[in-house]
Structure formats: structure tokens, C-alpha cells
Amino acid sequence: MTQPLNAVCLLSGGGTTLQNLIDLAERGELPLRFSRVISSRADAYGLVRAETHGIPSAVIQRKAHASWEAFNQALSDAVDAENPDLVIFAGFMSLFWPGERYIGRIMNVHPALIPAFCGKGMYGHHVHEAVIEKGVKITGATVHFVDNQYDHGPIILQEAVEVLDDDDADILAERVQAAERRIYPQAIRLFAEKRLIIQGRRVRILQS
Ligand code: GAR
């Protein structure tokens, strides 16, 4: 099996995304080990999940810092301390950019087909509510590399999800999250196998 990646997970909420990755890794289906989980909220249930699985955690809150720059620096220092191969956003709701040395080494999953329904304020349930409100017929999930803007870096994988006539935001969220649970591990596996090549805004996937 491919050498396990040393990963840091950044989250702000319930942590079902983290849980899926932990479960796959523990079953030997994903070459990954988390050296730390960092939360931007002290009450995030994702912290409990980390503790349950023996993963060290930390809380770094925007409101505890005088500026976004100070918050970003504190996060950068905490991430650097783990010397990670990969930084994994799992429902992380703050902007974070540790600089060019992390290009191609931070991933995010977004619950829509970027560039639709993304950007500041467009996260979690708000996305599915906006999708229903607009009446679009197709939405989906996107895994992308992170850059210095919200939901903006090069796209790695996308999976489309049909919006059905009787869907509300909750039902739609469940189907989109099922897609996220497929494509996020797949993207991480491709990264571990060194098969993701960034060419400008495009990500080429090398054949195995
Ligand atoms: C996930 O659905 C993820 O796509 C979304 O937040 C949820 C986190 O759930 N992320 C974004 O909206 C990022 N812009 P979780 O806390 O249960 O993993």
C-alpha cells in the first residue's frame, strides 16, 4: 500500500467529513493518518470525534485574534508544527492561506458544483437552500485544491447530483454529502499516489 500521508484536518462543525476519512483509514482503505485536528470553534463536535480516535486537537478561533492576519499566522504555525503532507479542510468555515509553500497541498470539499453556489457565506446548509431557491436541476460536490480565496483553487474531482422536485435542503444535503464521501477519499488517494498534476487552473489526473 502507498505510504500513509501525514495529514492535518481543519474543521468548524460536526465532523462527519472527518469521520468518513478516519473510518476509511482505520479500515486500511485510505493511506492517511491525522497528526492533528484543528477547529475554529471550541464547541465543534468534530473535536469529540478526534478525541475518540486518539487524534490530538487544538482550537484556534478567529475571535481570539485581533485581525484575520493574526488568526491566519496562528493557524499557519500550528499546521507547520505538524509538517503535514496534506492539509484537509472538512467543513472549515474560515479563510486560511499559509502561503505559496502550500500550493497543491491543501484540499477542500464543497457541497456544490464550483463555480456555482460558492464563495464567502456560501457554506453547509446555505448552499443547499440557495440551490433549491434558484431551481437548478443539477448540483453536486467538488473537491479542489485551496488557494487564497474561498472555494476557488483548481478543481480535482466533481460529482453531479440531481435535484428532485420534492427535495428540500435537508434531503438534498444528504445526497450531496453521500457524493462528498465518495469523491473526497478518491481525491486523497490520487494525491497519495502522486497522480494529481496542477496545470494552471486545471488538475490533470495521471493514469495508474
Ligand atoms: C460538508 O457538507 C462540506 O461540504 C461543507 O460543510 C459540511 C461539513 O460537514 N463545506 C463547505 O460548505 C465549505 N465551503 P461536517 O462538519 O459534518 O463534516
Image (cartoon, rainbow, N blue to C red):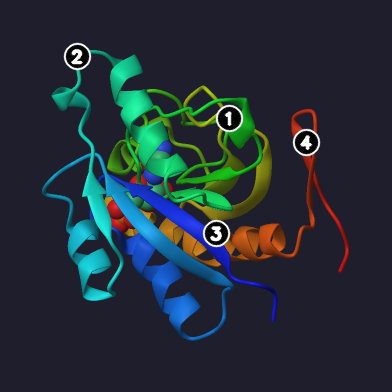
Frontmost residue, 205 versus 169: 205
Amino acid carrying label 4: it is Arg
Q: CA distance from mark 2 to mark 1?
A: 31 Å
Disc 2 residue type? Ala
The residue tagged 3 is: 184
Q: Which residue is mark 4?
A: 202
Residue, x 42% and y 45% (percent of image)?
81
Please name which of the two marks, 1 or 4, marks the residue nearer to the observer: 4
Q: Mark 4 or mark 2, which is nearer to you?
A: 2
Q: Residue furthest bottom?
A: 27
Classify mark 1 as within 8 Å of ligand 1 or not, answering yes or no.
no
Q: CA distance from mark 3 to mark 1?
A: 18 Å
User: Which circle's residue, 2 or 3, is located before the other in the chain?
Assistant: 2
- Tag 4, which secondary structure? strand
Q: Is residue 95 above or below residue 10?
A: above
Residue at mark 1: 115
Question: What amino acid does circle 1 point to?
Answer: Pro
Q: Are marks 4 and 2 in contact (CB under 8 Å)?
A: no
In 3D space, how far apart are the residues under numbered discs 1 and 4 (Cα atoms)? Answer: 13 Å
For the residue carrying disc 2, how many other residues have a C-alpha within 10 Å: few (<14), some (14-19), or many (20+)? few
Q: Earlier in the sequence, mark 4 or mark 2?
A: 2
| Labels 2, 1: front one | 2
Q: Which residue is mark 2?
A: 66
